[in-house]
Amino acid sequence: MAKLSRTDRLRKQELRLSQSLTIKNKYFLALFKPNQQKHARLGIIVSKQFVRRAVDRNLLKRVVRESFRYHKEDLKELDIVVIIRSECSTFGAKIWRNDIDNLWQKLIASLKIA
């Protein structure tokens, strides 16, 4: 797995998306708003409160980044922050991947409507 390029990442000070729209599902919350770039950028917030082990937090972030890379072309010109909503460390990467893919599909569908 390759890592996200610097241009695809949001810096820490940019993670606060005021006046952003939200989409959520069981495990993830996505805050998003248009940006001035020609491509989508991603920030990920995983709290110790919901995912205790660092190994699981890192795996979860890896799954989100990989899924973002797959859907990046459909998410043009957006700043997106993905926040973990609930305890999900007992589930595996397959369930996380399905859930985050569903979140991207909801986000893409909402962009087409607007």
Image: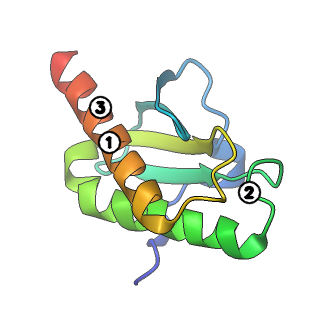
Q: Tag 3: residue type? A: Lys
Q: Quadrant of the N terminus?
A: bottom left
Does dot 3 land on a helix, a strand or a loop?
helix
Total labels drawn: 3
Q: Position of residue 66 (x, y in %)?
A: 39, 68
Q: Position of residue 50 (x, y in %)?
A: 75, 48
Reading the image, the residue beneath label 1 is 102
Label 2, label 3: how far apart the Cα atoms are: 24 Å
Which disc number belongs to residue 51?
2
Reading the image, the residue beneath label 3 is 106
Q: Earlier in the sequence, mark 2 or mark 3?
A: 2
Which picture quadrant has residue 61?
Answer: bottom right
Q: Residues within 10 Å of mark 1 (few under 14, many from 20)?
A: some
Tell me the residue at 26%/62% (across/down): 70
Q: Tag 2: residue type? A: Val
Which disc number belongs to residue 17?
none
Label 2, label 1: how far apart the Cα atoms are: 21 Å
Does dot 1 land on a helix, a strand or a loop?
helix
17 vs 104: above or below = above
Q: Position of residue 52 (x, y in %)?
A: 81, 61
Q: Are marks 1 and 3 in contact (CB under 8 Å)?
A: yes
- Answer with left or right where residue 70 lies relative to residue 34: left
Does dot 2 land on a helix, a strand or a loop?
loop
Q: Quadrant of the C terminus?
A: top left
Q: Nearer the viewer, mark 2 or mark 3?
A: 2
